[in-house]
Amino acid sequence: MSEPRTGSKPPIQQPEARPTALDLPPGELSPEMRAYLARCEEKIGFVPNVLAAYAHDDAKLSAFAAFYNGLMLAPSGLSKLEREMIAVVVSAANRCFYCVTAHGAAVRQLSGDPVLGDTLAVSWRAARLAPRHVAMLAFAEKVALASFSIAEADRQALRDAGFSDVDIWDVAAVASFFAMSNRLASATDMRPNAEYHAMARRGAA
Amino acid sequence: MSEPRTGSKPPIQQPEARPTALDLPPGELSPEMRAYLARCEEKIGFVPNVLAAYAHDDAKLSAFAAFYNGLMLAPSGLSKLEREMIAVVVSAANRCFYCVTAHGAAVRQLSGDPVLGDTLAVSWRAARLAPRHVAMLAFAEKVALASFSIAEADRQALRDAGFSDVDIWDVAAVASFFAMSNRLASATDMRPNAEYHAMARRGAA
Amino acid sequence: MSEPRTGSKPPIQQPEARPTALDLPPGELSPEMRAYLARCEEKIGFVPNVLAAYAHDDAKLSAFAAFYNGLMLAPSGLSKLEREMIAVVVSAANRCFYCVTAHGAAVRQLSGDPVLGDTLAVSWRAARLAPRHVAMLAFAEKVALASFSIAEADRQALRDAGFSDVDIWDVAAVASFFAMSNRLASATDMRPNAEYHAMARRGAA
Amino acid sequence: MSEPRTGSKPPIQQPEARPTALDLPPGELSPEMRAYLARCEEKIGFVPNVLAAYAHDDAKLSAFAAFYNGLMLAPSGLSKLEREMIAVVVSAANRCFYCVTAHGAAVRQLSGDPVLGDTLAVSWRAARLAPRHVAMLAFAEKVALASFSIAEADRQALRDAGFSDVDIWDVAAVASFFAMSNRLASATDMRPNAEYHAMARRGAA
Amino acid sequence: MSEPRTGSKPPIQQPEARPTALDLPPGELSPEMRAYLARCEEKIGFVPNVLAAYAHDDAKLSAFAAFYNGLMLAPSGLSKLEREMIAVVVSAANRCFYCVTAHGAAVRQLSGDPVLGDTLAVSWRAARLAPRHVAMLAFAEKVALASFSIAEADRQALRDAGFSDVDIWDVAAVASFFAMSNRLASATDMRPNAEYHAMARRGAA
Amino acid sequence: MSEPRTGSKPPIQQPEARPTALDLPPGELSPEMRAYLARCEEKIGFVPNVLAAYAHDDAKLSAFAAFYNGLMLAPSGLSKLEREMIAVVVSAANRCFYCVTAHGAAVRQLSGDPVLGDTLAVSWRAARLAPRHVAMLAFAEKVALASFSIAEADRQALRDAGFSDVDIWDVAAVASFFAMSNRLASATDMRPNAEYHAMARRGAA
């Protein structure tokens, strides 16, 4: 009786022509933004679809890129890997396919540990983490799921784990940023570039 | 037996010395950002605490201001009032005191209708809105509360109410932005400036 | 491109002809109830719509008024302001437009602090409250949102904050009453009288 | 290996000395209230603990009794059984032991069908009900669980099932009343009288 | 005005012809399974509908019976009553009519205390339980409602209450089993046999 | 300022010595079960930790294996891939690290499409599926998250998508089975075998 019906085999998931489900006419890009997208392509191998989507409006692409890079790449008391760990945990809480895929790849790359990426994408509680990271991700998850209930005791728990007040701002800012990005991606059905899936699957371990 | 106990009268809520519960040492601001804050003070009468908080880092203040202004003030198929209505509804869903207060004032100002601001801050379903605004706020609320479940039918409902695909991006982007702002404000206990509360309480009606 | 579309300006929110969305033929009121409504009008300046709605049935209006007044106005270990604070916090948890509006006005009036009313209506955790009121509102919110999970430890926390067992009954009874009132108001789309919105907006501060 | 440990047998659940977990000194009752409690005892065989609890305050007992009787026993477009069905469904949604027990007994008594009572206490969707009762209980459950989201379409569904606008008020009022009663009972750990459990267990069927 | 409308009396809940809402053609049963069902009928007085439903497939009935009996009847550090208490608490959390009915009867039978069964079916927190059983049911409820959040501290709480690691496996396994059974029963609208309702209603007390 | 702190690099996630967080003394295995585990090792390359965990009790291992194999491998109107798709979707809803990892690998293997596995593990709504699979997974998710609310219309939607009543039993049974397995795995902190992570990452596409 097994395997008989037409349609019981799901179609292979294809990369899509458009970065989102919206029909956004391409904007006129400034030389700076054209150069920025070219640098992305050179460095990563492709233009991430979130940038391709923002590219319908030069000013918005430019503001988004500056805001994102200031948050995720600028010097901070949080390492880049820590910021990507927050990105994956918040994106998993929001079940955002685009962001779990793209930032899961980043965690694999920065950590050299494909299992860490997989684990954070399902449940950070199942990872074997240091107390610093347990504190950081517990706070980030509360920012994602119940920000109205955050109290002084939650901030103090981060201080007790060695975070400065500026670091706490950064944890809150990164977690909040993905609360935004996840929603914009899900609301527009943003598709992760196919390249992300296979990236950094062979770890250092 | 009534009114007898010490402490049964709550203390008057005072404006606070710091914009948030975090101790963020003031950053060195660029001339551009000093001029920007001066313009805010001149135009609104004070520097909104969200900007005062971001001012611990010149680059982040600058990126935030550009990103915010591009979203909320630049030309769009959504009027400024519509964008502020989304801000209030999302902020109410997240129970963010800073943002409901600041953007509730903006709705009162832009609409000339203090009752509209009050209503959106509690429950937009209780307001008497046109079909365009019901569609817009229903979508924004879904972005705020269950973005993972947004489907093509939700986007189509906005198209049916007269929104273009670029407008849908803007509805999603504004709703998502406040998902971020609400969380950063709650996570840092950001305090609304006292001036917001009384602003535009006498409506045009 | 800004502000162009027909319908992008929301209609001014008008007071409505009927106190609720239901068509409730006016009942025959007893002289006592006619006198009661006249006293309300004299004292407050209008008949609150909750009473106008109950007035479709003389016996129900009379029972409701006695029950309400015994709870909110009779001598109690809780001050009238404390009972109104509970009313606002429970009504905000239930997103009831009628009750947040009417009892928010009462908090402003009794406290002389418009900011306290605004804060409780969004998130009591953002107010700067004494331990007595934190304990009282935490219990009231748990009554509103997860009454089945209340345990002896929750009652003990109120005793530790100085509440007697009769006071605990009163906290529970007031919070439970608004669990009822909020639901009846939302289920019938009860409209707050327009006068509530502007009431006591200028505080003592 | 089975059944070996001390304490693996739970203690028999005993009726308790006090109607609630609170120590409420007995109030001075008026002759009317003494007579009312005596009539209850005569008619039901005992004084329901909700009344015993309210009896710490004569005025509150009197107001509660009038309010309750006007709602549950006075003439209405809803039969007494229908009102008790709403009581059980709302009380089950709130997981209130006192009210499910007391009003479950009432449903068994008024319907002569012990299975109906059992079913409603777990899940009204599992009962085999007429469209009128499906509409009524779906509305009541929404009042219990998400009153803020009730819209005109929900009220219209009751009209379509044959309820008048006054009947809709009554459905909403009964459902809301138990939202209150459930919370007061759970918050004070009110104990159902032991007699309720065995009442009307043999049905007409 | 009372009791007037056609349809205001709900129909008596009848036992149904089929064990579920699905049309499952009866399978060819092996002699072993025929004997097993005959033994059930002899011992309990009827074939429980869960077995009647599984009987559409001999291999599945046989595997289910072995799995169930190994879990609920085999020697264990948990008494049979304790396993049935877990069954009722999990089934109540999932609002499963079939399982609350069938295992509520089992709790009444094994404990000789009908009030215990009733209490667990609504809210185990309202029962007067020993610390061992509070720990056991708190863990079981967390397994039912938020298994992803179970941490070492939760397992340690069971150890502190006297459970061995093998016992903890059994608590988790029984709670998880009913997470399955409840869902299969609800998804197929499985009907409890009418006999369960009246079983063991007269307790030892 | 970046990357400075000790501990800011998370430790590599190591496979663990024990299959779960519980100390379960190894049971005496029957020749049949020893042979079964040997066959698993031969076929898959390792003994899945769920079987290693059950191996503390020969009878329970045997019953679990029979029950699991009857459900997931026996002939059915659902293909094996379809059953694994349900497993991943339910396990993602429950955020179960063990099951998402193990059954995500199975989906990659059976479909030859690594993107499908990744997508289902985050959000099946983001996959591009045929109507048959949308109907199947929507039903499975409702079984996982709100089984009490399943109604005849939900079963009919499966029939309309071409499922027979026996198929509907199988969809419900597989979804319910993982509601169990996820909870047992999370409650005991079951660790997925390290081999699962890299399995079938290169798809047919």
Image: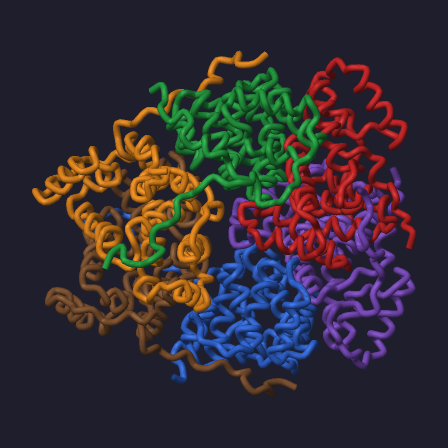
Chain colours: A brown, B orange, C green, D red, E purple, F blue
Left of F199 or right of it: where is C24? right
Q: Which is more toward the observer, B109 or B85?
A: B109
Residue shown at the point (72%, 60%) measured from the top left: E71
Q: Which is more toward the observer, B159 or F157?
A: B159
Left of B168 or right of it: where is C70? right
Can you tell which quarter of the image residue B23 is in? top left
Find residue E152 and report its horizontal and vertical position in percent: 52, 48
* A33 in relation to C84, above or below: below
Find residue F123 and report its horizontal and vertical position in percent: 46, 66
Find residue A47 and report its horizontal and vertical position in percent: 23, 71
* E201 in relation to A124, above or below: above
Q: Quadrant of the C terminus of chain A?
A: bottom left
* F161 in relation to D173, above or below: below
Residue shown at the point (57%, 39%) measured from the top left: C185
Find residue B116 and report its horizontal and vertical position in percent: 40, 42
Q: Which is more toward the observer, C170 or F33?
A: C170
Q: Is residue F10 visible?
A: no
Q: Which is more toward the observer, F149 or E91?
A: F149
Q: Is residue E195 visible?
A: yes
Left of B29 or right of it: where is C128? right
* C93 in relation to C63, above or below: below
Q: Quadrant of the N terminus of chain A?
A: bottom right
Residue shown at the point (20%, 69%) measured from the top left: A27
